[in-house]
Amino acid sequence: EAGVAQSPRYKIIEKRQSVAFWCNPISGHATLYWYQQILGQGPKLLIQFQNNGVVDDSQLPKDRFSAERLKGVDSTLKIQPAKLEDSAVYLCASSLTENQPQHFGDGTRLSIL
Amino acid sequence: AQSVTQLDSQVPVFEEAPVELRCNYSSSVSVYLFWYVQYPNQGLQLLLKYLSGSTLVESINGFEAEFNKSQTSFHLRKPSVHISDTAEYFCAVSRGSTLGRLYFGRGTQLTVWP
């Protein structure tokens, strides 16, 4: 079984630029999560999708962050414009249903200069 | 609201020594509990989980954790560690209604020395 795929693995941008991350969950997994992991901290949920609908985006900074999962499969997370404090690893996870354990991708490490 | 406290940010031990990584949580509802392991430049891997039933849960690589409701703890233990156990370990909880959203602790870096 292929795992959760994320790209790119690394990204370096200047502040105020835009960036997008891509996630392809495990085949058949209905639930998809995006987490932000700042250095020295545990992951923090940004947004949770059930198929193509948003279940929880209460911690997503909506003035600059957006995410979509239009066909209920892969997902894109965008930051526009980026701030220095957005430097972090962005992790995507998926689960078969909301009531199953999550499987994580290797993440995208974002550095803001 | 849920919160998770991992009391030790770093735990250095020698190979073959026992280790305990501590985790306490606060929640007003029943919870599900998890330990995840993260190797350098990789995502998180589920190590073990407590959903219900026996309060002692075990992983395939010798780790175990015990759910203690009265002390609101879920400490991770291994009687004899290997160098390959060096990694960051995260404790996480989710609401009792579904496994969905996870709340993570800050992590404990376990370093095993030869």
Image: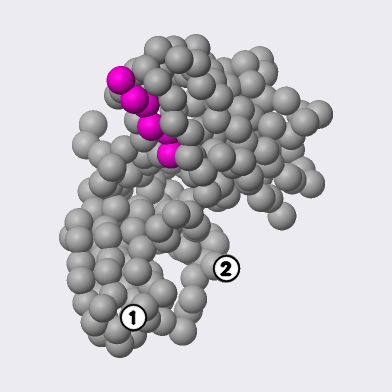
Compared to B70, does A31 lie above or below? below
Pointer 2 local density, CA inside 10 Å: few below 14, some 14–19, many at least 20: few
Q: Can see residue B36?
A: no
Compared to A19, does B60 lie above or below? above
Q: Secondary structure at mark 1?
A: loop
Q: Position of residue B108 (x, y in %)?
A: 49, 40
Q: Which mark is residue A58?
A: 2
Instruction: Using the image, name the chain to which the residue with label 2 belongs.
Output: A
Q: Position of residue A41 (x, y in %)?
A: 48, 54
Compared to A11, does A64 lie above or below? below
Q: Decide which of tag 2 and tag 1 comes sooner along the chain.
A: 2
Q: Which residues are magenta?
A: B109-114
Point 49% across, 26% down: residue? B48
Quarter of the figure that contains the N terminus of chain A: top left
Q: Position of residue A34 (x, y in %)?
A: 40, 58
Q: Quadrant of residue B39?
A: top left
Q: Quadrant of residue B69?
A: top right
Q: Can see residue A110?
A: yes
Q: Which mark is residue A50?
A: none
Point 61% across, 28% down: residue? B75
Q: Which mark is residue A82?
A: 1
- In the image, is residue B112 part of the stretch drawn in magenta? yes
Of B6 and A24, the residue lying toward us: B6
